[in-house]
Each structure stands twice: as C-alpha cells, then as structure tokens.
Image (cartoon, rainbow, N blue to C red):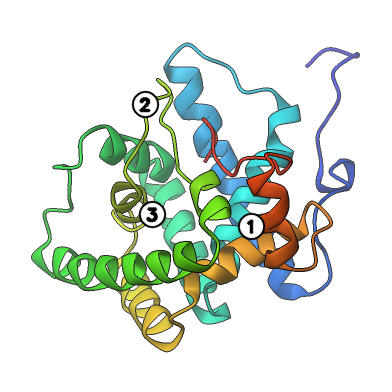
C-alpha cells in the first residue's frame, strides 16, 4: 500500500447506521458481502470503487433489516463459515440469477426455498398493489443490464443460505406478510422519506433513486 492510499474503515463511512447492536451486526454482514462482491468483480476483470459502497450498503441493509435479529445472526454465521471454506456467497447469488437451474443439490434446502418463495412473492404482490411505482423501482438487473424477474431475484437471496437460516427466514415471512414492504420502508428512509406514501409520489414522478443496479 502506497503512502497516498486511503485506508477505508467504518469511521470513514459516515452514512453507516450505528444506533444499536443490530445495526453493527448488519454492517458486519454488508461489509463481508462487499468483500465477496469485490472479489467476484475482480475475478471478472472489473473493479468496484469504494464510492459504490454507499449504494450497496443502502440496498443490502434494507434487505437484511426485514429479518428478525436471530435470523440476521445466523446469516452472519453463514458468511463466516463461507469465508473459511472458500465460498463466495455473492458469486453464488449472481450465478443463480444468470442460470436459475442452479439450485442447491440438498433436497431439504430446495424444499425450504420452495416454501419461502411463494410467501415472498405474495408479500411482493401485496406491496406492489399498494405502491406500484416503488415496486417497479425495485426490479433487479444483472451485470449485463438484463432484467431479472422478481421471483428469480427473491430466490437468489436464498440459494446460498444454510438450512438453519432458511428455517428462520421461513418463520419470519410467515409471521410478517408485509416483509417486502418493510424492506422498502427502510430503503426510502435513507433518502429522507418518512413514509412510503410520500416516496411513492416521488417514485411516480421519477424523483426517487432506483433500488437496483450491478451491486444489488
């Protein structure tokens, strides 16, 4: 590292939420995911700039915020195990989005995913019915800028999780029909919006930042 290089630390990232221990745990998760994303892009001959981390953090924090704290803790454990076993969970997520036939071989994991996805889709449809403009902004894109169907994106968030984590996600979505709404509620708060209703008006007028991109 040269003398002019800037060491990026949590303190340099002033946008990080630090209100409670749960925030700290989610930051650790997003930072690990960012490392995996950076590695994946590097292996593809691309480079992620540190300036992209803020958008990445906003999307990933929002995604994880809908999970209960014990579920968040289990996913943090999944990431820790992955780093010690040479797995890149973000690469696995993107590999699935490119080829939705790449489901886990373990039949128990497949059963859990098959149970979770319809519930997530129902929550997505419930949200889209109330906030269509915001729901449209949440459509994911892969690195070639091809639209990824929402069901594929939802599944991509599950294919790299452990059985224990999937069991807890299943519990969370069963307990909370507004799971997807909660994700968006947190996301719009990063842009100073205190209600989905106000954010929907801005989204309809194309004045809200899209919740999508190559770093989802």
Q: In this view, does 211 lie to the left or right of 95?
A: right
Q: Which residue is drawn at 52% across and 80% down?
A: 70
Q: Position of residue 124 (x, y in %)?
A: 41, 64
Q: Which of marks 3 and 2 is nearer the N terminus?
A: 2
Residue designated by label 1:
61
Residue designated by label 3:
157
Q: Residue 146 carries which label?
A: 2
Secondary structure of the residue carrying numbered label 2: loop
Q: Which residue is drawn at 37% across and 26% down?
A: 146
- In this view, the residue in front, 128 or 68, is 128
Q: Which quadrant is the N terminus positioned in? A: top right
Q: Do the residues labelled 3 and 2 touch (CB within 8 Å)?
A: no
Gap between marks 2 and 1 measured at Cα: 24 Å
Q: Are marks 2 and 1 in contact (CB under 8 Å)?
A: no
The 10 Å Cα crowd at callout 3, few under 14, some 14 to 19, many 20 or more, is: some
Residue extending furthest toward the bottom: 175
The 10 Å Cα crowd at callout 1, few under 14, some 14 to 19, many 20 or more, is: many
In the image, residue 129 above or below residue 174: above
Disc nearest the viewer among 3 and 2: 2
Secondary structure of the residue carrying numbered label 1: helix
Gap between marks 3 and 2 measured at Cα: 18 Å
- In this view, the residue in front, 12 or 132, is 132
Q: Residue at x 62, y 40 (%)?
A: 210
Q: Position of residue 25 (x, y in %)?
A: 66, 66
Secondary structure of the residue carrying numbered label 3: loop
Q: Position of residue 145 (x, y in %)?
A: 43, 23
Q: Earlier in the sequence, mark 1 or mark 3?
A: 1
Q: Is residue 181 left or right of residue 187?
A: left
């Amino acid at each position: 590292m040269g003398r002019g290089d800037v060491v990026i630390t949590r303190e340099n990232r002033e946008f990080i939420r630090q209100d409670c221990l749960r925030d700290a745990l989610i930051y650790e998760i997003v930072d690990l995911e960012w490392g995996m994303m950076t590695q994946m892009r590097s292996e593809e001959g691309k480079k992620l700039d540190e300036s992209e981390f803020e958008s990445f953090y906003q999307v990933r924090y929002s995604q994880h915020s809908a999970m209960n704290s014990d579920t968040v803790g289990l996913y943090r454990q999944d990431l820790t195990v992955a780093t010690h076993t040479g797995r890149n969970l973000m690469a696995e997520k993107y590999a699935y989005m490119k080829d939705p036939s790449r489901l886990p071989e373990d039949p128990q994991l497949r059963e859990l995913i098959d149970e979770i996805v319809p519930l997530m889709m129902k929550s997505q449809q419930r949200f889209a019915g109330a906030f269509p403009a915001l729901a449209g902004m949440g459509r994911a894109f892969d690195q070639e800028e091809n639209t990824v169907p929402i069901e594929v994106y939802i599944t991509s968030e599950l294919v790299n999780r452990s059985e224990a984590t999937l069991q807890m996600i299943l519990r969370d979505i069963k307990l909370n029909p507004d799971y997807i709404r909660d994700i968006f509620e947190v996301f719009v708060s990063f842009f100073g919006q205190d209600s989905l209703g106000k954010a929907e008006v801005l989204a309809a007028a194309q004045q809200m930042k899209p919740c999508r991109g190559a770093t989802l």
